[in-house]
Image (spheres, rainbow, N blue to C red):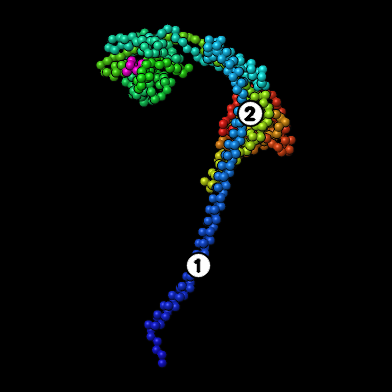
Amino acid sequence: MISIEPGHIEKDFKIYKNIKYIRFILPIFGLIIVLGAIILGLSIITLVKVNNKVDRIIDKHHESTSNAKARQQSLNSILSESVRIEDAMSHLNELQRIAKVSNGTRAINTSGFNATLDYITNYLTANTNYKVTKSFFFLRDFALANNPVLISSVNGITKNYTYSTQISVADFYHAVYSTSINTNEFTQLTAIPNVGCSDDDWQKANPSPAGRVALVKRGTCPFREKIALATKYNVKAVLLYNDGTSPDRVSPIEITLAQENSMPTLFLSFTVGQALLNSTQNTRSNTRMKLLIEAKNIPDYPVGNICADTPSGMLKILISDYQKQNEEKMYPIVQELVKAQRELREVKGQLKNLQSHDTISSSSSSDNCDSDVSTISLFVQYNGFFNQLLDIQQTMTIENLLVKIRQLTGISNDRSIRLRVLSEDGLNTIFLIDKELNRTIESYNNCLKARMILNIEDSDDDDDREKYLKWSKSTSSSSERTYSFDESDV
């Protein structure tokens, strides 16, 4: 008879349980390993795709940049070939001749300056088809009626300081555009702490500068800022003085204040200014000043300005009219540059998308728009080169907007164009202008911003051409306008 010990039965039962447990766990571990491998593989594939996409974007950016640089070099070559040394020398010789017969100067408010304006106007009118206009603005003139006088009184002891046009021997000098003053009586002098470039300096002055003569040291900020603060704190007159930080900063100097200045002002040497400062810091001293400045009452004088406007208002302003062939060479280059500029903007937008993991909004929602703006400033761009700020009202119709645009840019009615409104940074298209002529700007009220870019594009589509030819019934010439060419566009 076989006997079975209880210990053996228990041991065999444990082995059986372990084997059963292992058979149950092994498939689970295998499944986990397989899933982990799948996830890891997917992650690697995703990273590779993202990396390749980023590389393509960066390569495209570098390629566009390189192409733009190459085209820019070609453009520069064409422009440089348009400049002739003999022409430049001819103009320089004529300007030198004008100076010689005008007492050796062509400065503003002289006969030489006016003769220069006439020469430029006559030359452009006779040799180009530019629309030449001459305008004038007025500047304030300045001259002294008599030499200024400066006298100090320290505890009753007076001293008269020297004014001279020879700076090396002068104690003080006049300031251009200083106003007249005759104090008659001595006025208390107060020294402004530090260099008088902040409100804190003027507020800490003791005694208060209001109604007194202020002593202000040179340094840190422009003289005009010091004078503006003196005016703010109701100073009677200002005595600026040199800082003595180097040998060439000891003598007085001639300074020019703002044309709208209303403050009597003199400029002292460092030696005189420092002596007066020491006197004001002595509590037992009573330092007072007497000033006499007599400025002539001279009427403002006109200064001429010339504007030469090309018929088309575009790149022709860069090229002489007698080199039409170069202009023809430049047009395809311009088109390529505009295309490259758009590609760069697209790259910027794609990079921004990758960094934020969000799609750039087209700015069509009312949350990103200024629906309550009444006046909109449109920065007009045509082929990336013509830049002009145009202010319009929301109530303006599309037809009237087209009239203004064609007048502003010189685009003829037989040229088909497309209007695209961009965000202020130029990266996003907000909306395309509809072809309904009676539609008003305010009908885009969910997309309007106070400042936007209006991009004008040539349209090659026949259907567009037929519809756009009906736009802009007015061909009247625009009034005087100013053109600017941004280097980033070129």
Looking at marks 1 and 2 on the same chain, the residue that comes earlier in the sequence is marked by: 1
Side of 74 relative to 281 (left or right) = right
Amino acid at circle 1: Gly
Above/below status of 46 relative to 248: below
Give the residues in magenta.
Answer: 269-274
Q: Which residue is mark 2?
A: 315
In the image, farthest residue toward the top:
146
- What is the CA distance from the residue labelled 1 to the residue labelled 2? 72 Å
Q: Which of 324/349 is in front?
A: 324
Quadrant of res 443? top right
At 48% from the left and 67% from the top, the residue drawn is: 29
Above/below status of 211 relative to 343: above
Q: Which of 145/130 is in front?
A: 130
Q: Position of residue 434 (x, y in %)?
A: 67, 37
Q: Position of residue 267 (x, y in %)?
A: 39, 15
Above/below status of 404 relative to 89: below
User: What secondary structure is marked by label 2?
Assistant: helix
